[in-house]
Image: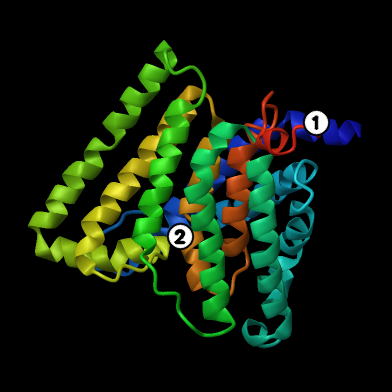
Amino acid sequence: MKIVDELKGNLNLFLILLGTFSFLQFSFKQAFMFPSILPLNIPNTNLLLAIGNISFYFFFVFLLIVSIILSFTYKSLIPLTVILLVSPFITLIPNYENSFWLYSLEIAILTLGFVSTIEGLIKSSPLSILLIPTLLLVNIGIYAAVLLNIFHNALFISYLTLYFMSIAGYLAYVISWGKIKSLRNYVAISVGLLSIIPFIFFENMISQNRYLEILMNMILPSILGITLYNPYHITLLVIALGLSVMGILTSLIKGNVSASVGYFLIITNVFLGINGFSLLIYMLTPIIGFLVITSGEIESKRRLIDIISPTRNG
């Protein structure tokens, strides 16, 4: 139990490391691979790709550690942590992408993921109700992945609309978290608002440059894995990314590391989970990301589960 308590006590440290390597692997592996194939002069390409690949392995390790720590609080996360642990070895199965084992694990992730996110929600404070759109985004994303990978049917839904709904709830959650009338909150919101300015300028550049618009339609949806049914919505995606960065930075400055890291894990993986690439980590990471966010509310004096069941102790 001493080891468990020590792990729980260092959760924020592991979250910072997870967030750091998640950012590095996203920047230099996940996001970098698509622009790198274009006829662009990118210096030190091989070095950056190496950093991205190495960061991905550290990202997996710290994601596993965080998942193990959270599983002591969220019992439904235990089997998902086991799946995450064995997921790298699934590829050793011949023709694994069409195997019964992969299909079974994806169905398990769909079911247990829904249970885990609900558990995370009800064990947190009433403020977490604002995260329901994000919960829907995560679970619909996993459902779409199962529908596509197993039943070979695409879920035709506006993922961009789901994304904006999630952002709206997340921003409301971040702004409402902690002391609203405080200098730190005002500074955090101000920095967050400033961070969206480059995205507004970039959106304006795209809307006025057809060639750049075509390039971004090739790159941005591929990086995130999101499907845009209307190519002219690429500017809306840029604004959505700007709002996401605003929320993440605001949360980080306010001291809510869990919400910052958790949401970054969600937006950088949830849509890739739909496309799949037959990698279970893209389906598991958004679930863990959501629980990372709600874990910041686990010590709240008033939890949703206590409101739902007043006679329940703890």
Please tell me which residue is depicted at 45% across the width and 79% down the height of the picture.
154
Number of marks present in the image shown: 2
Q: Is residue 198 above or below residue 233?
A: above
Q: Nearer the viewer, mark 1 or mark 2?
A: 1
Say which of 23 and 309 sits in front.
309
Q: Residue 111 location, x and y as percent?
A: 68, 65
Q: Tell me the amino acid under the disc marked 2.
A: Gln
Q: Residue 36 location, x and y as percent?
A: 34, 64
Query: Circle 2 sits on which residue?
Result: 30
Can you see residue 281?
A: yes
Q: Quadrant of the image for the N terminus? A: top right
How busy is the neighbourhood of tag 1: few (under 14 within 10 Å), some, or many (20 plus)?
A: few
Q: Quadrant of the image for the C terminus? A: top right
In terms of sequence position, does the residue under pointer 1 or pointer 2 come before the other? 2
Please tell me which residue is depicted at 70% across the width and 87% down the height of the picture.
94
- Looking at the image, residue 114 sits to the left or right of residue 203; the answer is right
Q: Residue 60 location, x and y as percent?
A: 64, 54
Can you see residue 34?
A: no
